[in-house]
Amino acid sequence: MTLSLTHVRGDRITVAHGAAGTELFSYVYRPEADWEAPKPYLHPVRTLSGALVTDYRPNDHRWHKGLQLTASHLSGQNLWGGNTYVHGEGYLALPERVGSMAHVAFAEVGAGADRAVIAEQLTWHPHGGGLWAEEERRIEVRDVDPDTGSWALTWTSAVTNRRAEPLRFGSPTTHGRPAAGYTGLFWRGPRAFRGGRVLTAETAASGRSGEPAAPSNFPEPSEFPEPSEIAEPSGALEGDPMGSQSSWLAYVGEHDGRDGHATLVFEHAPSNDHLGEKGTHPAHWFVRTDPFAAVAPSWAFHDELVLPPGETLARTYRVVVADGAWDRARVAAHLEGLAW
């Protein structure tokens, strides 16, 4: 179960497992292209057997990078990357709205026999470079289990508003586009995972409707249909998870280039306290299986989340990465055996 860590300063931290040194992921914090809303991300992410389960800069959305924290609509700015959705006009090239999340320092970086930790301080900026928020981020690798062919990653982000006015977290759906509530922690799966199977704590279901492809070059506005032209998703289909609530959601995909499947399980921490009647701002799942594989426990699917000045938004998620095609019972049993 030995974990090891390699830090190439100014670029990335890579966590590996076992005598063979299987790289579980690289955490890349080197800034990239401005129009992609520079921010740290995890890619490549792999199973214990070395199978790839993330994509990087796909030709349909160059700003999709593995597993990353995003903010698609933030008080008029786009910390997601690429074109910005404007109701009535579609997705437009608005570089003056594209912001960034910047690495400041690491508070802790280390690995031991059964755990690896990356604790980081970041700042969030609009396009003009002002300070809008400070983030304390902690990523941990634990529960590495060769018997089940799985390992778990926990991601905690505490974002504090440093503006003199509220930060308004939104999404394309809060701005008028149905079934596009993406924001927050976002995973983009490999191209081979298109058409995968989706499971939740409540039901088993296949994925839902697709999203029109975005352009690969930023300067050209995209030809997205207006919201009225996009089929109403999810709720009309029995068991469709798009926009639904559940304590966890799993995505099962099949590999190209090698035999077999992988399962990724995304789970809310109980500390998030935003599911059910007690939730002050309920989270909903954004999930696609076509035309690509993607999952996000959205911060603002149907309604904006408003963060007053000086206050902190804290969320913790667990991502289980497993070899094989797990069913709902196996996912539930595995999660029951894990502690937060």
Image (spheres, rainbow, N blue to C red):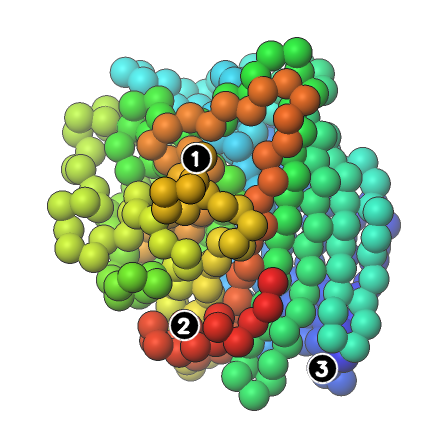
Mark 3 neighbour density, 10 Å: few (under 14) some (14–19) many (20 or more): some
Question: Which residue is pictured at 69% across the width and 60% down the height?
Answer: 140
Question: Which residue is pictured at 34% across the width and 36% down the height?
Answer: 180
Residue 201 visible at all: yes
Give the mark nearer the N terminus: 1 vs 3. 3
Query: Regarding mark 1 in the picture, which secondary structure is present there?
Result: loop
Question: Which residue is pictured at 17% across the width and 26% down the height?
Answer: 228
Check disc 2 and report the residue beneath it. 332
Q: Which mark is nearer the camera, 1 or 3?
A: 1
In which quadrant of the rendered image does the N terminus lie? bottom right
> In this figure, what is the number of numbered marks?
3
Q: CA distance from mark 1 to mark 2?
A: 25 Å
Query: Regarding mark 3 in the picture, which secondary structure is present there?
Result: loop
Check disc 3 and report the residue beneath it. 1
133 lies left or right of 180? right
Q: Nearer the viewer, residue 44 or 246?
A: 246
34 lies left or right of 182? right
Q: Nearer the viewer, residue 116 or 229?
A: 116
**Hey, what amino acid is under mark 2?**
Ala
Check disc 1 and report the residue beneath it. 281
Q: Are marks 2 and 3 in contact (CB under 8 Å)?
A: no
Query: Regarding mark 2 in the picture, which secondary structure is present there?
Result: helix
Q: Nearer the viewer, residue 49 or 158?
A: 158
Question: Which residue is pictured at 52% across the width and 54% down the height?
Answer: 270
